[in-house]
Amino acid sequence: MEIRPYRGGDERELVAVWNASMVCDRISSQIFHTKVLLDLNFQSINLPVAIEEDRVVGFVLALTRRVPFGPFGMQPERAWITAFGVHPDYRRRGIGTALFAQLLQRLEAEKRTTIDISPYEPNYFAPGVDVNAYPQAISLLQQRFGFQIHEHAFSMGRDLSNYELPADILVQERQLSQEGITIQPFTAADLPDLMNFLLDEFGWGWYDYYHASLLELCGGGPTKTDLLVARQQGDVVGVSHHRDERFGPFGVRSDLRNRGIGRILLFRCLEAMAARHIYYAYFLWTEEEAARLYARSGFQRRREFAILHQGRGEETAVAQT
């Protein structure tokens, strides 16, 4: 077996191994191009592949920053692993262990003191390792390489095929309007206030994620994106959106929470999705407490992820959507 950096001619075999090993997280060649090869931080050396019998049989994808990430800068102490796998026909031969050992040794030599699996911005595929789909991968990372479970994340979804706006939403909207709070679809006039609100209230992760949606919304081409803005006496106080079937994130200014604004933003956004004939809404990431709140709104748990962490360092804020 040989372990070497990824080469352009490896694409077909690597995608095939990815899809055979990460069966709940399959990708196309197009996604591999846009979310891996065209990621500004991608380097072939951080995508080691295992070669056996003249074919790719395993890989690990890691990212380190080559360009600054907003206020977080270059984060020279950090690295992220976003995908890895060994073809089922070649498992139990130590290939995965060898790939990780070589990669982690090199990252240590670069003085990367903190490694996370896998909350990397901007192009993570899942919040972590699916605890039901890949339990053996979690055991390997914990027992052989000292990774620890930092937290659990939950993906949830809701059927929209027979969606109806709850009747009490109209009552809540009338009550809030008397307090000067309105919720309207996004227009370009919202941009200056909205971007400042996102950065000040929710940080760079949300700002960056919404920025991508806004580029699509303002680009003039076909889109399946809706964005709602809540204002109180002219000030932005809440926001919600979706991109195709992917819902969120949505949030309300901290001093106005528990007033029903978030509930209206959620259900009005789902209504916009249903109007576009989108029959299912999902998001990849929320925590235990928020999952219970979503459950009261008709969402059901789809997947559970373990976010694994090795080393020490400050956790990176990510767009939890």
Image (spheres, rainbow, N blue to C red):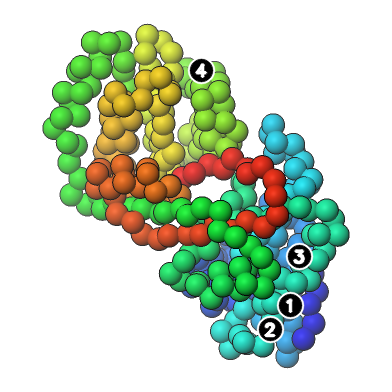
Residue 75 visible in the current orientation: yes
Q: How many labels does the image show?
A: 4
Amino acid identity at mark 2? Gly
In front: mark 4 or mark 3?
3
Give the CA distance from mark 1 to mark 2. Answer: 6 Å
Quadrant position of residue 90: bottom right
Give the CA distance from mark 2 to mark 3. Answer: 15 Å
Dot 3 crowding, Cα within 10 Å, few <14, some 14–19, many 20+: some
User: Residue 98 has which mark?
Assistant: 1
User: Going from the N terminus, do you reach mark 2 or mark 3 first?
Assistant: 2
Residue 56 visible in the current orientation: no
x 67%, y 77%: residue: 96
Q: What element carries label 3?
A: helix
Query: Residue beneath label 2, please?
Result: 94
User: Going from the N terminus, do you reach mark 4 or mark 3 first?
Assistant: 3
Amino acid identity at mark 4? Asp
Question: Do the residues under discs 1 and 2 have CB atoms within 8 angstroms?
Answer: yes
Q: What element carries label 1?
A: helix
Give the CA distance from mark 1 to mark 3. Answer: 10 Å
Give the CA distance from mark 1 to mark 4. Answer: 50 Å
Looking at the image, residue 318 sits to the left or right of residue 247; the answer is right
Quadrant position of residue 110: bottom right
The answer to which of 69 and 258 lies nearer the viewer is 258
User: Residue 104 has which mark?
Assistant: 3
User: Going from the N terminus, do you reach mark 1 or mark 4 first?
Assistant: 1
User: Residue 193 has which mark?
Assistant: 4
Query: Farthest bottom residue?
Result: 53
Is residue 174 placed above or below 315 in the rendered structure?
above
User: Going from the N terminus, do you reach mark 1 or mark 3 first?
Assistant: 1
Looking at the image, residue 118 sits to the left or right of residue 41; the answer is left
